[in-house]
Image (cartoon, grey):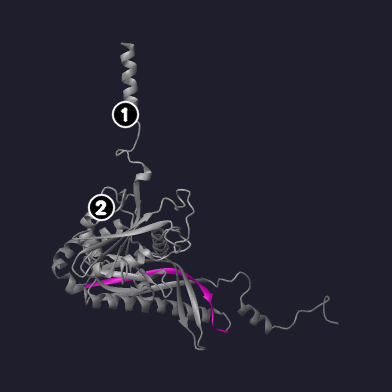
Amino acid sequence: MKRILIVAALFVCCLSLTSCADHTEVNDMNVVVGLGLDETKDGMTRVTAEFVNPQNSPISGGQGGSSGGSSKSKAYFIRDTTGPSLEDAIKQFDQILPHRMYMAHNTVVVFGATYLKHGIERAFDYLERNRYLRRNQMMIATTGSANRLLAAPTDPEPTNAFGLRALAEQAAATSPVMDSEQLHIIKQYLSPSHAPVLIWMDLDQKGRPMQKGVALLHGGKIVDYLDLPHAEGLFWLKGETHQIQVSVPCANHHKTTFRIVRSNTKVTAIQNPHHKLTFIVSLQGTAEIESFCSTELFDQTLYQRISQQVDTAVLDKMRQTMKTLQTDDVDAVQFAAQLYRHHPQLWRKLKGSWNQDFTHLPVSYHVHIQVERSGLIAQTPTRWLEDQGKPPRVQGGGAK
């Protein structure tokens, strides 16, 4: 009896041990780190996959050569397949690769211009249901081919997909608008505004990926692209921002540059007695002077003037971006979500005509940026100008 109890106890302990469910060795896997989706002229889906090269990957102890080196020295390799749908194209990788795909480490999904044109929502169902794919993978839009962007070198990152993700994460640190994680995009897609915003990347003149701005979608289809200067207006319209530079022209053909350290935005929906809906956008923030073009003494009058200049610069960008959004009829500022959250009964009345109402919706702005410091470590040049107007200091203990 005692022996039976010992065996039973050992059996119970074995049940608590963890292991791989499919018993697949790492060497028998093709680890996917990036996916690119394009649509061919005949309506087929082309899937480009970036795999870790086990012989040269820095993770596996290989050489991990430059991402722009030869195919033998690269830390990755790229293959593509074509099928009538996303899942069919991915299934075909098993027919051209000796090892099966392992997608749990995928970091980015790049949507090409042709795929964006006909809607990316057809990919959402597969990306959400696949048990291996994680919801923190970055979704990136490009005006060219996803295949080309995914294959572009991202030195010093040895693996291109990791370089693309690093660029996306740097952009997201500036504003939540640039947050292109799958979970965030799906929430925007399912929100009352139905307007997801993806980070937009393209290749520069040297063929290297770079941040270009944001892609505006209505539903799952592309509507417009905003370059970074215009995207900043969307940053301030939607919420918190960090470390954004703003330049104001000067009379001497130079410019004063401010760095808005942080800002916060509050959006309020108000319905007046005549049942007319108005949105009020209130922004407050702090800024520092990066460079100053004026030789005037930095007194209170000049301080108030430059404070008004930075307020005006931010306000102009917000108005310009809002005009673009209303022209494109895409509620990327999520006003519908704000209305649904705070005035649900009013939203039910306007839900059916929101697309038409949004295009001529009145918006009021209140902007106040507090300029705090000049950014200099020691005395400012204006202090030196003030000293020039003073008599020289007496040397040797007084006048003789």
Write down the residue under mark 1. 15
Image: 6 above or below 29: above
Percent from the top left, x then y, of residue 389?
A: 67, 85
Tell me which segment is drawn in magenta. 277-295
Question: Which sits in the foreground, 393 or 362?
Answer: 362
Q: Horizontal placement of 312 versus 41: left or right?
A: right
Q: Give the secondary structure at mark 2.
A: helix
Q: Quadrant of residue 35?
A: bottom left
Residue that protrudes farthest toward the right in the picture: 400
* Mark 1 Cα shell of 10 Å, populated few (<14), some (14-19), many (≥20): few
In the rendered structure, find residue 172 and report the number of the disc placed on it.
none
Residue 319 drawn at (x, y percent): 32, 78
Q: Residues within 10 Å of mark 2 (few under 14, many from 20)?
A: few
Quarter of the image where the C terminus is located? bottom right
| Residue located 32% across and 69% down the image | 142
Q: State the residue position of label 2.
A: 95
**Tag 1: amino acid:** Leu
Instruction: Let me know if residue 360 is in the magenta part.
Output: no
354 left or right of 244 in image: left
Considering the image in quadrants, where does the N terminus appear? top left
Indicate the secondary structure of the residue bearing disc 1: helix
Residue drawn at point x = 53 percent, y = 77 percent: 291
What's the CA distance linking mark 2 and mark 1?
36 Å
Q: Residue at x 52, y 74 (%)?
A: 289
Q: Could you tell me what secondary structure mostly forms the magenta stretch? A: strand
Looking at the image, is mark 2 or mark 1 earlier in the sequence? 1
Name the amino acid type tagged 2.
Gln
Report whether residue 317 is seen.
yes
Q: How many marks?
A: 2
